[in-house]
Image (cartoon, rainbow, N blue to C red):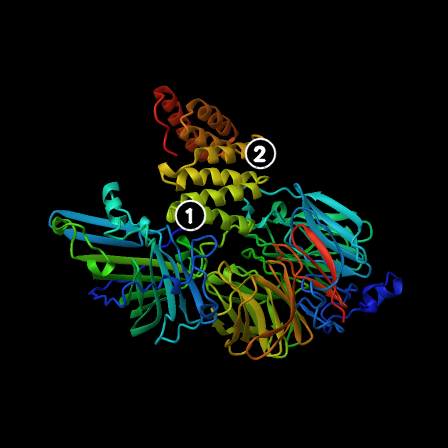
Amino acid sequence: MVKSFVITAVAACLLVPLLPRAAGAQTEELVAPRSRGGQTLEVPEVHLDLGQVYHVTPGQDTQLSLASNAPLQRLLATTSRIVGYVVAPFELADQKKPLLAGAFRLPVTTLRTASPELDEMLHSAPFFDAAGHPEITYRFDRVANVVYQGTADDVFHYRLDLVGELDAKGSHHPLTVPTEVSFWLSSNQTLNRFVGDMVTLRCKLAVAAKDLGWAPPHPSYRLRIAETLEIDLFLLLNTVSPEQPLDPQADRRKFTDELRFVTLLRDLEDVETAYEHGRSYLQRAWSDAPALARMARLTLTEARDTDRDLAFALKAALRAQELDGGRDPQILATLAQVYAARGDAASALEWQQRALALVEDEEKARALGATLERYRRQRERNTDPAPP
Amino acid sequence: MPATRSRSRGFLHRAAPWVVGGVLMSVPLAAQWPQWGGPDRDFNVDARDLAETWPQGGPPVLWRRPLGENGHSSILVDGAHLYTMTRRGDDDVVVALDAASGDTVWETAYAAPTKPGMIPDMGPGPHSTPLLVGPRLFTMSATVKLHCLDKESGKVLWSHDLMEEMGASHMGRGYGASPLAFEELVIVNVGGRETGIAAFDQASGELVWKGPGLRPSHSSPILATIDGETQVLIAMGNQRAGLDPRTGTLRWSLELPPTAATTMSTQIWVEEENLLFGSAAYADGSRVIHVARKGDKFQAEVLWYSRQMRIMFGNAVRMGDYVYGSSGDFGPAFLTAIHLKTGNVAFRQRGFARAQLLRVGDRLLILDEDGDLALGTPGAEGIEIHSRAAVLDRTAWTVPTLVGTRLYLRNRNEILALDLGS
């Protein structure tokens, strides 16, 4: 049911010097922790009482790009996994302070380029040091230089500076970010993207690499890593928390547990904790066929290849099928998918055929049929497992 | 102890007149809670002797029992009996329960399978609340089947399939408006291209009149007296209108922006001010319409509109100069107070999920969808909550029913009775 939204706003480009304070001082703890599901932050009471909270919608857009243009190398890393929130006054009539506070977390390992080798470099100790400092955080508690740019079609536009603090690699930096902010009241157009009222934040800024704690290990890196990095940020936020299931019949607690699994596995790459949580959840959902099937699918789709516990996925999928008794084509197709990932094309083909036999809808039948063909080719090739 | 008139089974009790808020209906509804919204269809209850503070663990549970597989119908009270609707497989099930024990008195099931293309996320219903008039119980299914049953036996006396007969719409997620009684008629939203609203004879089921095509709506019609004239007020699509309840003749109509078509909440008529309050969520908000007689005609105009209060499927209640409701659709919900004449928001209060309200004197009973029940007194800056207890599991979307000090409430699967007495 979650749909995506298009947001406008003009970006401003600015060189923003970062002034590090005492080395080693960390502000991560000053930014609200992640929510239980991990897809937003636990908004503190003081902010909840302040005004309307808008949550970042992660995973729907390329939220941040970081570019390094050096003479011998161009590096472009992007992420869609920033989580966080802003608080706006209930009444937008207060045009002096359209935003009141906010906080964000960016898991460093989700910043990725097109190259695994470059990713490894980026996440290594001389650069972001993902192992030692898994997240970059930013929080602001006031805005400055607010310029109201007008309203068109129920969209309110502002240009302002977020005045806050950045924490990267253990260093705390005051950081003022010139930002274009737009408030989108829910309309028939915005409903094409998502439900609820929305806010968009856009900014472009240039940051000295050393101010992010980067210390390339060898002088030769001068030709590969630029001294100034260009950051382009786009955030979509809305009044609906990403942990709010839009299906009224959905069990909120289960939905949150599944989100938590995904967050640990995909965003934080804490594989051990993810599966520990996953196994605990499977026990609690042991009578819930759709939930078990979802966990099997999430393992295949959200984990990196090296992090997929296929035994875990098979256990969940088999139990789901046992409970369902062969009535739900989606559960059958999930079991087929797990077998395919394990390299067992024959079993994948068998279960996929059973799923296809149950489907009447033409479009669904076409999709299942295409996957069936892929499994057939896999069996004929008898090669590596088909991708999920 | 509950008030005496809620408990007796005797003929004398049942025959005791219940003239509702002035002369709106010439056939009095004798039951204590005969329809959607209670005696006056406005969620106002005249109840006394409610305890302000509850024991730890919540008010005493008089009884609790399972109730079918689904449904959001409110609970009617008629002396010793309760009536509501639930779901079992492809059937709607109308149930009569013993008010003292919750035991089943009778059940009547009729086929009401979902239609192709219906969106299942709200459940198959039934969403509508029955209507009790004298010896007859009128029910509406999510697929717009109108039934009349004998309230003593549950026997079906007559029925209409309004989708087949009048092109009614289930609106995707199932029809949700509740029928309305006027004299010998039962009036229902139809929402068809040719027939927007219709009235049937209560006794025979014969069609008496039908109004012109209107867009379908979950917002239940209400009766109102506007400058001496009784009208049925409807909120259907983006149209707001008053009709003659005897003939279906349009007396006035106002077209609102298309965003107003998402309304589900029941309107509030303030007779002494000629003001009509309505609210919708999604892209709309709340507005007050002033309706007044001009000679033989009626004129309607919007007095104010505000997006600061957006009621989704919940109800609104009026207390003095303010309207209270749970504002919010998919995001956080705030208990909101808005001034009837100006549209200024007095306060927004966190702490509850999307909620239904009952006004009980100068206090509010709040039941949110997570099953939290609370009693509070609204003030200038918020509602002072006196007591709060978790009484139901999610999803508790049904407005509770209060008769005397006994509160009847339900979610999709369970129904219970609480003692709120002091």
Quarter where residue A198 is shown: bottom left
Farthest-out residue, top: A380
Image disc number at residue A264: 1
Q: Amino acid at mark 2?
A: Asp
Residue B115: percent from left, percent from top: 58, 42
Q: Residue at x 44, y 53 (%)?
A: A38
Q: Is residue A192 above or below residue B298?
A: above
SS at circle 2: helix
- For marks 1 and 2, the one nearer the N-term is 1
Q: Amino acid at mark 1?
A: Leu
Q: Are marks 1 and 2 in contact (CB under 8 Å)?
A: no
Q: Mark 2 = which residue?
A: A324
In the depicted view, which residue is nearer to us: A15 or B350? Answer: A15
Residue B50: percent from left, percent from top: 74, 71
Q: Residue at x 31, y 54 (%)?
A: A63
Quarter where residue B55 is shown: bottom right
SS at circle 1: helix
Placement of the N terminus of chain B among the 4 image quadrants? bottom right
Horizontal side of A343 relative to B395 (left or right) equals: left
Image disc number at residue A176: none
For the residues labelled 1 and 2, the Cα–Cα distance comes to: 28 Å
In the depicted view, which residue is nearer to us: B12 or A242? Answer: A242
Chain ID, mark 1? A
Structural crowding at the residue carrying mark 2, measured as other residues with C-alpha within 10 Å and reported as few (<14), some (14–19) or many (≥20): some
Placement of the C terminus of chain B among the 4 image quadrants? bottom right
Q: Is residue A51 above or below residue B144?
A: below
Does residue B294 show up? Answer: no
Does residue B97 show up? Answer: yes
Structural crowding at the residue carrying mark 1, measured as other residues with C-alpha within 10 Å and reported as few (<14), some (14–19) or many (≥20): many
Mark in front: 1 vs 2: 1
